[in-house]
Image (cartoon, grey):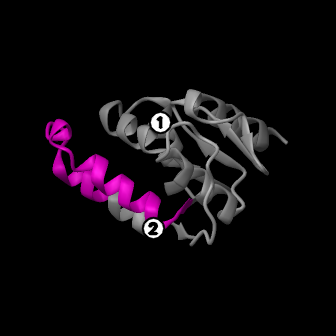
């Protein structure tokens, strides 16, 4: 199973566009085609962002279900810090990806990330879906 880290903006988009590529990324996790990896800092950001008042129009049960799914993801505890991204909170996702040995970090906001971090490739949800299709064709 392919190990991935999912940026918060992908989760938000999946909640707002249930038919979009972001929602399909989560379906890959639910269907056990991808192993979602998280760290305590990543989980904390998910909770903080998804509980903001601006997301009050999203049904609360959707948010709680998503956070419960994230809570069942594989947990890692990075013992180091990264200072690669100009957007400091995004470094937590790079730390998580490195500690988890993730193949992909899936984000809708590539401008804050390098093209890759160590062994992890930073890709968009659409690129992730293309990679999953290519893998299943092999």
Quick one: quadrant of the C terminus?
top right
Q: Work out whether 1 lies above or below 128.
A: below
Disc ID at residue 40: 2
Task: Answer whether residue 120 is visible to the viewer in this image.
Answer: yes
Which residue appears at 56% of the width and 33% of the height? 112
Q: Tell me if label 1 and label 2 are in contact, CB under 8 Å.
A: no
Mark 1 or 2, closer to the camera: 2
Q: Where does residue 131 sit, x and y in percent of width and height?
A: 72, 37
Which residue appears at 42% of the width and 38% of the height? 9
Magenta includes 63?
yes
Q: Main secondary structure of the magenta part?
A: helix
Which residue appears at 44% of the width and 29% of the height? 20
Q: Where does residue 56 sit, x and y in percent of width and height?
A: 14, 41
Q: Where does residue 38 sit, x and y in percent of width and height?
A: 52, 62
**Relative depth, front residue between 129 and 104:** 104
- Residue at numbered disc 1: 22
Q: Reading the chain from its start, which is encountered first: label 1 or label 2?
A: 1
The region drawn magenta spans: 37-66
Distance (Cα) linking label 1 and label 2? 22 Å
Disc ID at residue 128: none
Q: Secondary structure at mark 2?
A: helix
Task: Answer whether residue 33 is visible to the viewer in this image.
Answer: no
Instruction: Name the image quarter holding residue 123.
Output: top right
Q: Is residue 16 left or right of residue 61?
A: right
Number of residues whose C-alpha sits closer than 10 Å to that of mark 2, classed few (under 14), some (14–19) or many (20 or more):
some
**Relative depth, front residue between 31 and 71:** 71
Quick one: quadrant of the N terminus?
bottom right
Q: Secondary structure at mark 1?
A: helix
């Amino acid at each position: 199973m392919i190990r991935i880290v999912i940026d918060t903006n992908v989760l938000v988009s999946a909640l707002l566009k249930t038919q979009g590529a972001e929602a399909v990324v989560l379906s890959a996790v639910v269907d056990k085609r991808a192993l979602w990896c998280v760290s305590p800092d990543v989980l904390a950001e998910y909770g903080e962002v998804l509980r903001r008042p601006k997301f009050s129009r999203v049904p609360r049960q959707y948010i709680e279900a998503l956070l419960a799914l994230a809570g069942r993801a594989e947990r890692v505890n990075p013992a180091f810090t990264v200072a690669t991204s100009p957007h400091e909170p995004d470094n937590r996702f790079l730390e998580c990806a490195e500690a988890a040995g993730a193949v992909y970090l899936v984000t809708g906001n590539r401008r804050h990330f390098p093209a890759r971090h160590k062994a992890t490739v930073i890709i968009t949800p659409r690129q992730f879906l293309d990679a999953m299709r290519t893998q299943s064709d092999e």
